[in-house]
Image (spheres, rainbow, N blue to C red):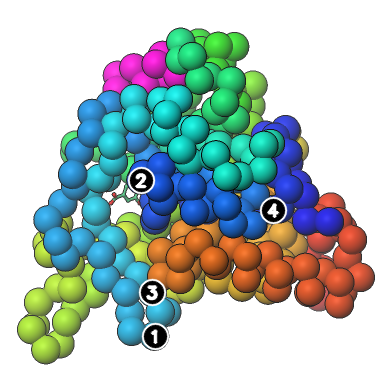
Amino acid sequence: ELATTVAGILLKTCVYNASGPRSGTSTALSKVAQSASGAVLAKSATVQKQSGNPQPRTWHHPDYIASFNSEGLPNNGIDYYIDATTIDDAMKDADDDKPYFVSLSGKSLHDNMEMLHKIASAPTKNRISAIELNLACPNVIGKPIIAYDVDQMDSILEQVSQLTDSLPPLGVKLPPYLDFQHFQQAASVLNRHKKLVKYVASINTLGNALAVDVVSEAPCISSNSGFAGLSGPAVHYTALANVRKLRELLDEDIDVVGVGGVRSGKDVFAMLLAGATAVQVGTCHWIEGPSCFDRIVDELRVLMEEKGCRRIEDVKGKLKAW
Ligand code: DHB
């Protein structure tokens, strides 16, 4: 039994796709929907459709230990991701009750509010199980990533709170924290907004990493002077620590969804032990394709059986002390 809940929403398996890779179109999303993925999460939307940065904007290490991206948020715009035809096409061959989530990454508070208002009045509102608000992206140019600036995060959540009753449940995507003071400051803001924030997804990419191509003697990525978000196995241990620490500090009403470098049933199990209620897969999905959900869920099922764990609840947060 690998079922779980995120923000009170039932997922038949506790593994689903992260926003970003292979999540920009209804065709891509339909492949996730037909797999063992417990939910379907769309690419972060902006108000308007945009094509993103010039190529090459992604790079995978040949041994798949790390991936880099500076895509510049290519996406089809919010109207596409909440459109009935998109949701029909994405979900048509999925289990009837498989949840569909949207992700928002507005370029300003104003843009995020505009997208939230669109959802609040959308005819498809009741088909959107939850909204993931991406606070791990730069918002105002010249200011830090929203979730690295607790005052900015507080004021955004304060504004969004006005819409709580007219929206599906809301989660926030967080960047990695590396310092216990920062964990405490972030958790204290999130706890203050627990009526609004029903889950956190932790972590987004580790920001501004640099991969260098020794043959060309240039960065592996052309945009942003080569600086790019780091993902994949290289960030898995940072992700586990973030899940563990956030689970410790957040009010129990806020679920923690673990994301970062997960590519096996063992990795999912470790995330569950650290306190995750569900686990998203980004980079591995990007590299391997949607069959990764079937494989990872099978591996988790075998491991749970070997260990005599019957439910996610038997594992969640049960990391042992030495
Ligand atoms: C992009 C990368 C991110 O990590 C994110 O949260 C949103 C967008 C991008 O480069 O497209």
Quick check: is 109 in the magenta stretch? yes
Work out whether 122 lies above or below 29: above
Residue 128 place in picture, x, y as percent? 55, 28
Horizontally, residue 176 falls left or right of residue 266, namely left
Q: Earlier in the sequence, mark 4 or mark 2?
A: 4
Q: Label for residue 10?
A: none
- For the residues labelled 4 and 3, the Cα–Cα distance comes to 24 Å
Task: Between residue 133 and residue 30, name the one nearer to us.
Answer: 30
Q: Earlier in the sequence, mark 4 or mark 3?
A: 4
**For the magenta stretch, what is the residue range?**
107-119
Q: Earlier in the sequence, mark 2 or mark 3?
A: 2
Three-letter amino acid code at disc 4?
A: Cys
Q: Earlier in the sequence, mark 1 or mark 2?
A: 2
- Which type of secondary structure does the marked residue at label 2 adopt? loop
Q: Which residue in the structure is indicated by mark 1?
A: 63
Q: Label for residue 66?
A: 3
**Quarter residue 295 falls in:** bottom right
| Within-10-Å neighbours for mark 2: few <14, some 14–19, many 20+ | many
Horizontally, residue 206 falls left or right of residue 17, namely left
- For the residues labelled 2 and 3, the Cα–Cα distance comes to 22 Å
- For the residues labelled 1 and 3, the Cα–Cα distance comes to 8 Å
